[in-house]
Image: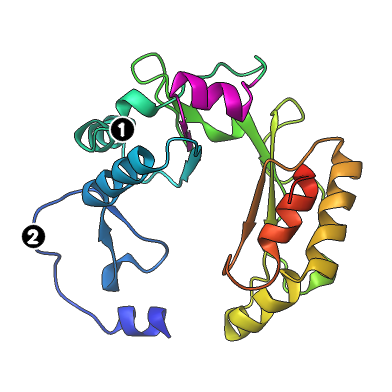
């Protein structure tokens, strides 16, 4: 429906060019990026024992991305990491204050912005186009077998039932067995569990079970 609405809009874009957050249908909905990241800085200040990861589908340059993080006051928090080196524990990241990891889907920041990490050098993931629970595979999609972080995509790419699909695959009896299966097949503990509607189903219960807490 959103795409149909977008296609009815005509005319040339107006207003200044600036970085913003959106996904897929940016013409009819977007959030200015810098104020949003300033909100993240405030949140980090108020939650000193939290670690945050951004995985950015970068349709803007590394330089423009770096400007947003700098203007938002986030540079003191960003972590730099070389591919192949062991990742610090969450506790170590909290102790050093380097609690923000920035992964870029396409291009990293190179030597100029070494904290803008090339995401698929660091992480590997699973498929994200499953239409049914049976199609939720544990096979590697992006990344390489040397990428140290494991991202499990766990949603049904079926927008006519996106909420009920989330209820189904976020349920403990569905999500937890899949995490265990992927951990066994890949030989890696899932570092990130990506879902639709984190507040539906049993995501936090599953993550606590994986971490043996709670």
Frontmost residue, 213 versus 76:
213
Under circle 2, the secondary element is: loop
List x then y, in percent, for residue 115: 42, 23
Frontmost residue, 214 versus 132:
214
Residue drawn at the location 29% of the way across and 31% of the way down: 66
User: Residue 15: which numbered mark, if any?
Assistant: 2
User: Residue 74: which numbered mark, if any?
Assistant: 1
Q: Is residue 182 magenta?
A: no
List x then y, in percent, for residue 213: 75, 46
**Which one is in front in this view, the residue at disc 1 or the one at disc 2?**
1
Residue drawn at the location 56% of the way across and 16% of the way down: 82
List x then y, in percent, for residue 45: 33, 38
Q: Pick out the residue farthest to the left.
A: 15
The residue carrying pointer 1 sits among few (fewer than 14), some (14 to 19) or many (20 or more) residues within 10 Å by Cα, namely: some
User: Residue 201: which numbered mark, if any?
Assistant: none
Residue 128 in view in this figure: no
Tell me which segment is drawn in magenta.
Answer: 87-103
In this rendering, would 104 be left or right of 128? left
Q: How many marks?
A: 2
Residue 125 in view in this figure: yes
Residue drawn at the location 28% of the way across and 49% of the way down: 39
Q: Is residue 96 magenta?
A: yes
In this rendering, would 99 be left or right of 127? left
Residue drawn at the location 50% of the way across and 21% of the way down: 95
The residue carrying pointer 2 sits among few (fewer than 14), some (14 to 19) or many (20 or more) residues within 10 Å by Cα, namely: few
In this rendering, would 105 be left or right of 74? right
* 178 in relation to 169, above or below: above
The N terminus sits in image quarter: bottom left
Give how far apart the Cα atoms at labels 1 and 2 are: 27 Å
* 72 in relation to 29, above or below: above
Frontmost residue, 64 versus 50:
50
Label whose residue precedes the other's in the sequence (1 or 2): 2
């Amino acid at each position: 429906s959103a795409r149909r609405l977008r296609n009815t809009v005509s005319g040339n874009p107006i207003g200044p060019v600036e970085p913003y957050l959106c996904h897929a249908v940016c013409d009819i909905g977007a959030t200015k990026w810098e104020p949003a990241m300033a909100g993240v800085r405030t949140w980090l200040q108020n939650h000193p024992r939290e670690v945050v990861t951004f995985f950015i589908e970068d349709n803007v340059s590394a330089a423009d991305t770096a400007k947003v993080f700098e203007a938002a006051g986030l540079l003191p928090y960003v972590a730099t990491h070389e591919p192949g080196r062991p990742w610090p524990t969450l506790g170590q990241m909290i102790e050093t204050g380097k609690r923000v990891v920035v992964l870029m889907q396409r291009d990293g920041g190179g030597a100029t912005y070494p904290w803008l990490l090339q995401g698929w050098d660091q992480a590997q993931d699973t498929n994200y186009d499953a239409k049914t629970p049976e199609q939720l595979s544990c096979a590697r999609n992006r990344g390489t077998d040397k990428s140290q972080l494991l991202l499990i995509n766990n949603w049904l790419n079926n927008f006519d039932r996106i909420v009920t699909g989330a209820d189904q695959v976020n349920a403990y009896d569905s999500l937890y067995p899949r995490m265990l299966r992927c951990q066994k097949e890949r030989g890696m503990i899932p570092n990130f569990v990506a879902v639709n509607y984190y507040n539906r189903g049993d995501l936090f219960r599953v993550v606590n079970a994986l971490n043996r807490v709670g």
